[in-house]
Structures are given as C-alpha cells and as structure tokens.
Amino acid sequence: MAPANTLPAWSELQAHRDDVAKNFVLKEAFASDADRFNKFSRTFKADGSADILFDFSKNFLTNETLDLLVKLAEQAGVERKRDAMFRGDKINFTENRAVYHTALRNVGGWEMQVEGQDVMNGPTGVNGVLAHMKEFSEKVRSGEWVGFTGKKLTNIINVGIGGSDLGPVMVTEALKHYGAPDMTLHFVSNIDGTHMAEALKASDPETTLFLIASKTFTTAETITNANTAKSWFVEKTGGKGDVAKHFVALSTNEAEVTKFGIDSANMFGFESWVGGRYSVWSAIGLSVALYVGYDNFHKFLAGAHAMDKHFRETPLRENIPVIGGLLGVWYGDFFQAQTRLVAPFDQYLHRFAAYLQQLSMESNGKAITSDGSSAKYTTGSILFGEPCTNAQHSFFQLVHQGTKLIPADFILAAKSHNPIHDNLHQKMLASNYFAQAEALMVGKTDDQLRAEGTPEELIPHKRFLGNRPTTSILVGDVIGPAELGALIVYYEHLTFVEGAVWDINSFDQWGVELGKVLAKKILKELDEPGNGSGHDASTGGLIGAFKSFSKI
Ligand SMILES: O=P(O)(O)OC[C@H]1O[C@H](O)[C@H](O)[C@@H](O)[C@@H]1O
C-alpha cells in the first residue's frame, strides 16, 4: 500500500487545507448555509437501539472537504481493508492473525470464517461460548451456582489488566443502572498490592467469585494477582474452599489455565483473532453478563453488531465511523492537532475515555507503515477525557483559550436513567452540552466584551477566539446496552479507518513489550546485591536508592 502522503488526494487536501485555514470560519459557515446542520449530521438507526445523532457540522468541513476526505479513503483502500477484516483475512500482518472481534457480536447470522473454518459454530465457536456464558451467568445470578458453603456468590472480583480490565470496568460502570443490586464488583488490575489488598479486605471468601481474565494467561500482573487471590482463598477457608466453585478463567490459553489450577470446564475461551482491546464482547465480558444479566449482554452485542452492519454496508460519505475517522486524519495531519478530547456528558460513562485511550492509542500509536518504512506523517492522536460537567471546571480552560487545537467529541443521552428533581439535573446537563460546543465555535469578540463594559486591559484575557471544532453525539433515549454497544463500535471503526488511511497495523502492540522485558530483569536484580547490571547511571542509581530506602 502506498504511504498516505503519496496519494493524490493527500496533496489535494493539503491545498484545500490552506484555503480552509485562511477562509473557513465555522460560525460564518452556519450563517451562510441554513442547511449546514442537515448536510453534515448523520443519524444511526437500528432495530433494538435508539437513534443516535452524530452532528459533524461543527467541524472544519465543507462539501469539498468531505469529497476530498472520501477520495483519500478510497485511494487508501479503506473499503478494501474493511472488507478484508470482515472476510477474516489476516490483516494483523505482524502477528499473522485475522482481526475478527466482529464475529463475537455477530447476532445477525453472518457467515464468518477464518482459514475456511466457521468461527460461529462448532465446539469452540462463538455461539457455544455465549451459551456457556448465558448458562453460567444465569446460575450465579439465580443462586443455583453457589460457593463451597452453599452461599450465593454476590461478590465478583475480576482480575485482569489492559483489555481484560478496561472494557469490563467501563461497561459495568456504564450499565450500572441495569446491574444486579445484590452484586458487588471489584476489578483488580494493578500489580500494586494495594489494588488486590483493598479488594480482598472488602470480600468474604464464601461469597466471592474470581474471574481470572487474561487472553494470554501469561501477563505478569494478572498471574501474580491471581496467585495472591488463590492463596488468600485457600488460607481464609482453611483449605476447605473449593477452587472450582470460586475461580473461573477467561482466556485463550487452556494449557496455562489448567496449570494455574482452574478446571478447563470452568474456562470461557476465545480465539487469538480477538485483540485484547477488542475483547469486551468475548468471554472477557463475563463480568458484564453476570452483573447486568445475559439478556442485556445480548442487547449490548446486538447494538454493536448494528454499528458493524452500518460500517460494512454504508457508502463512505454516509458512513458514520468513516466520517469520524477521516476527521481524525484531517485534524491530525492537516491541522497538526495532537489530541482528541472525548467528554461524555454522562456520569455512568466516567471510564469511557480511559477505555478509548487503549482502543485508540494502542491501536494507532505506530510510526511504521505496512512496508516497514517510517510514516512521513502524524499518526495516532493523544486521546483524553473526563465526564462533563466536571471537566468544564477543570481542564476546559485550555480547550477554550489555550494555544492548541483540540477537536472534541461531546456525548449526551436525551434521557437520563435518573431524572431526579423533576429532570432538572438532566436539563442542566444538556444545556451545558449545547453551550460548550456553541461557545467553542462562536467564541467572544472584543466588541461583545466592550459592550458588556469589560475594562480595556482585560479584553485580551477575556477574549474567546472560537472556531474550535466539536462533534456532538446525541443518543435518542437513555444509554442502554444496545446504545452503548453501538457507541463503542463507532470508536472501534473510527480507529480502524484512521489506521487504514495511515497504512499502519492497528492491531499489534509491540510497543508495550520492551518495558515488560526490562522489568523482569530488574525484578531479579532487586534480590541480588548491587545496583543491577548494564544500566545507565540514573537507572542504577535509582535501583540502589530504592534498595537502601526499602532496606532490601
Ligand atoms: O489479556 P492479557 O493477555 O492478560 O493481556 C492484557 C493486556 O496486556 C498487554 O500488555 C497488551 O498491551 C494489552 O493489549 C492487553 O490487553
């Protein structure tokens, strides 16, 4: 594949960018085109999900921009790459793997195969695992599956990190409204003993179920945490506790699961073609099914599948994740935007940005293109975010008046799960959602400030330049399982589109390896005399200081 900057549409976009940067002012674009909102917004419609309105009109977009961006997508082979993904081709070319998380939520009955094998049916197929998850989650929720003293398991501890943690945490938080009221969830990810210690402190072994979630089942943090949990369980139960009733594994690695001491009958499997950051739809989502019930988990998969269908079948110009991804390229490569802000106006989505950080930054934080050469352009942006209105009272100062261009996504549900105080809270939340995007766009001029009586010396400080782009996402009801599924998949495919244009492999993560290897070496050195070997003076000095401070 040709590097993105050698595609003809790239140069056309560069010339167009100069024009836009000089002449395009968002508020003027609205003033001169009454139809702009309709032209640049798209509504996602699907059975079983509320409509979701994606308003792209407050972006640096004209008809010509969109035409050129679509042309770029065509020339970069976005459709071809998308079809290859859905066909089960090994598009993760550095690991020689298919990228097939879309099969996990294939509730629409598409035929899906990898290497000529049906991945939906058969002994290790997706449908079988889903049936196992349904049966198990229903038994635990109803109290049919009990602990070693016959008590219902109401305290769930998910032990996992990265994709085996962030998805389950985010989704269970987002769907708290649907959660079993008698169930407490803990997510232990950090190797910092504090994380496990605090979870165990709050747990009773008789009612605790451990989900050991690890695709590889070799991740140091997870295996260490899982062993600590097992020792605690055995010790607290005086050896009488039945590990088989209290520990299950969510993994692709049956050999390691068995070695750990979990019966393979209590293992929920998935395949190597599921990337960690795309695994919440797989057995890794068991905590979600346990907490919100399997029917809701199924709705979550169905909402996701509906967005897959939209992405797979909709022409580029109308395709919502395609537009989102192309805007990422537009701002990153043509306006030097380094970041992307995602701010949900929704407290239940308080871990959404953390989840998207792994999705986006682990996928597209790459500098090497498909032929092994360095990309001559900017790739993955730095994604950050917090729920609003909190974020407004924290870092939004920089978004409004700082020197950087920060394209922002704002997400709101039209209806709240908690319309307390006569829905006043929801109306205030919504008014902020509208106001922030409007303020970022229209800004405040010196004349307006003067008219308000602002002293002359304060005018530069109080000036808002405006013309800052936002995408507003409005869910047409509450955010339920289906709507959440669709929202996540919007970002998954947006990330895919960016990576496809940049000609990078969005599905490996070699960049996390080096630190892991060094940590393993240093761990040994902490038990040996001296400051370790082969380190620079700073690292060696720090190791020495740590040893003397902690008296190792
Ligand atoms: O699920 P696991 O195999 O334990 O992996 C957990 C996580 O660790 C790795 O370091 C990767 O960077 C992540 O993509 C992955 O989700």
Image (cartoon, helix red, strand yellow):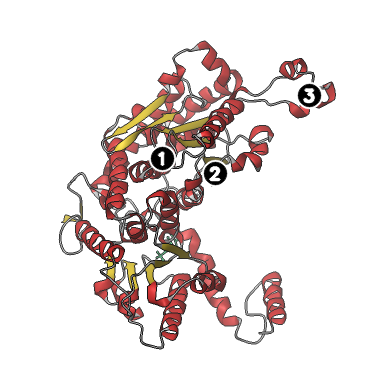
Q: Residues within 10 Å of mark 1 (few under 14, many from 20)?
A: many
**Residue 402 image label:** none
Q: Position of residue 172 (x, y in %)?
A: 41, 54
Mark 3 or mark 2, whichever is nearer to me: 2
Q: Earlier in the sequence, mark 1 or mark 2?
A: 2
Q: Secondary structure at mark 2?
A: loop
The residue at label 3 has a CB less than 8 Å from ligand 1: no
Residue beneath disc 1: 494
Task: Locate the N terminus and report the quarter of the image it occupies.
Answer: top left
Task: Locate the C terminus and report the quarter of the image it occupies.
Answer: bottom right
Residue 478, placed above or below residue 235: above
Q: Position of residue 466 (x, y in %)?
A: 63, 25
Rendered residue at 47%/20% (across/down): 62
- In this view of the protein, which residue sits in the foreground, 147 or 280? 147
Label 3, label 2: how many angstroms apart (C-alpha)? Answer: 30 Å
Label 1, label 2: how many angstroms apart (C-alpha)? Answer: 21 Å
Residue beneath disc 3: 459
Residue beneath disc 2: 387
Rendered residue at 64%/74% (across/down): 535
Q: Residues within 10 Å of mark 3 (few under 14, many from 20)?
A: some
- Image quarter of residue 462: top right
